Every structure is written in structure tokens, then in C-alpha cells.
Amino acid sequence: MKKVVFTFCFAVLQVLYLQAQEMPAGAPPGRWVSFVHVESGLLNPSGTIRDNIAIRQNISSFFVNQVSDGEINSTAFGIYAGLRAEYFLKKFKTGLSAGLRYINYGSEISGFSARNADFFYLRYSMEGSDTRFARVKSMSETTNFITIPLELRFIPIQRKGIGLFVKAGAELSLLNLRHSTHISFQDPEMNVNEDEILQQISTPANKFYSTLYATAGIKFGYEGRVNYIIEVFLPGSYLTKDNFSLTEVDYFEGFKLSLQIPVFKNQNE
């Protein structure tokens, strides 16, 4: 993995260097500029627990009162870091970028069956009149991807050291590094049955991953210097299905922080 990231970074810088060396004489001044973006952010997927995960007690998203017969909570999050190279046309206030991004998704299902019982009942087998339940404290899932993001940015407002922009983007998985699910049982003796139960209740996760999204943001900094960028994801769509085994995700939101580093500016007269 380190070799892949290093090779990509070296290739990006090499391409930008060659562009600078091969810029033809007589090109209009200040026509374009190249940037490298170093980014990091958080994603907040929104969805529901899959129907094939059968939990016995009534499901409530909040604690009602002392006599409540159970509560189930489902949480999901994503963190990522990436590197992109951008070719920005100043006349059109538009830039096109591509790069590599590492994404780590995590989700958890937890709850209790009564006020003093920090577990829920999970049905994992039905054979005739024989129905089996496991007492579960939590179920968790982790997924890691390397993706290729492609983004188009438009900056309609630029005043001194502040610029407002909107962006449309898409990403496609290059590698599915790891996917795992885990059950934390109330009774440790059930651990030997974990793989068997997971096969009964979980949906195989898709090895491919792609999204379509839009963001709005603000950048701080002057031309020719490092700029600091904050942007917010508008509700984005998952183009692939079955991205996760435990939850069915409908859309995602989030935010991103990044550095915009100038690499080369066309200054030919």
C-alpha cells in the first residue's frame, strides 16, 4: 500500500513538472495553474438496519421510559484522506482534478432488551419449530477502500483572500483492502459460533464501490500561496448496491478539510 501511494504521488508531481517544461512559448499569460490538494474528512452515511437481521424486541430510536422493552441503535461513519492533482483554467474559473483516496467505513448495531440488560436478542436460525436466538451486545462492520475521485470545481466568487466554490464529483473503488464483521456476544461461549451466525444473517458486501456527490465550500488564501479549504458534502448517492453487510445505506453527508498547494503557473508572455 505504501508503495502504491508513493508511486502515485511521484507520478503526479512528475506530470506537473513535465507540463511546466513543455509549455509552448507565446501562450497567454496566467492562463492556467496546477495544484496539489491534500485532503481529509468525515462522512456520515444514513440508512437502516437490514431486514434479514432479525432482532426480537421492539425497535425504538430513543429511550421511552423505564418500562421500555428495548432499544436498538445503529450508527455509521466514514473517515478518509487523499491526494489530488488539479488543472485549473483561470478564464473559466474551473478546475478538473483526479487522485487517490483512502476510505475507512465503520458501523455498529447496539442496544438493550430491558433497562438492566445491555444486550438484544438476535434470531439467527429457524428450522421448523426450532428457533434460535443469541444474546448480543453489539455487531460491528469495517470496510476499507482505495478509490479514484474525479472532481470538477467552479469558483464563481473570488474576493482578495476568500473564494466561494461549488463542486461535483464521483469516485470509483480501485481496491477493496479489507472487509470484516464482528459480533460481541453477551455469553463468551457463543464466540465459537460467530462465523456460522454471520453466514446466516449477513449480506455479502459488494467488492466494488462508487459514489456521486456535490459539495459547497470556501477557501482562504492568495494566489501563488498555500490555500486552506473547508467544504461540506450535500447529500450524496451510492451508485453501487450492498456496500455494507449490516446496514442498507441510502445517502451520505459530511465535510472535508484540505490544503491547496500551487505547483506551476503559466507565466509566459
Image (cartoon, helix red, strand yellow):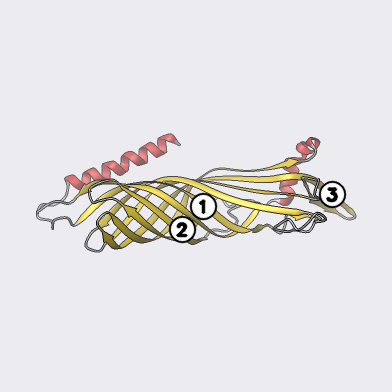
Quarter of the picture holding the N terminus: top left
The answer to whether one can see residue 248 in this image is yes
User: Residue 259: image x %, image y %?
Assistant: 35, 46
Give residue 132's mark: 3
Quarter of the picture holding the C terminus: bottom left
The residue where tag 2 is placed is 233
Give residue 43's mark: 1
| Pointers 2 and 1 in contact (C-beta within 8 Å) | yes
User: Residue 133: image x %, image y %?
Assistant: 82, 48
Describe residue 15's horizontal placement relative to residue 149 as left or right. Answer: left
Q: Which residue is drawn at 66% across and 45% down?
A: 140
Describe residue 226's horizontal placement relative to residue 216 as left or right. Answer: left
User: Residue 8: image x %, image y %?
Assistant: 36, 41
Q: What residue type is labelled 3?
A: Arg
User: Residue 230: image x %, image y %?
Assistant: 39, 53
Local packing at callout 2 (Cα closer than 10 Å; few below 14, some 14-19, many 20+) is: many
Above or below, comparing residue 232 to residue 195 in the picture:
below
Q: Which secondary structure, mark 3?
A: strand
Q: Which of marks 3 and 2 is nearer the N terminus?
A: 3
Instruction: Measure how far apart labels 2 and 1 are at the Cα level.
Output: 8 Å
Instruction: Measure how far apart labels 3 and 2 are at the Cα level.
Output: 43 Å
Q: Earlier in the sequence, mark 3 or mark 1?
A: 1
Q: Earlier in the sequence, mark 2 or mark 1?
A: 1
Q: Which residue lies furthest to the front in this view?
A: 66
Q: Which amino acid does label 1 sit on?
A: Leu
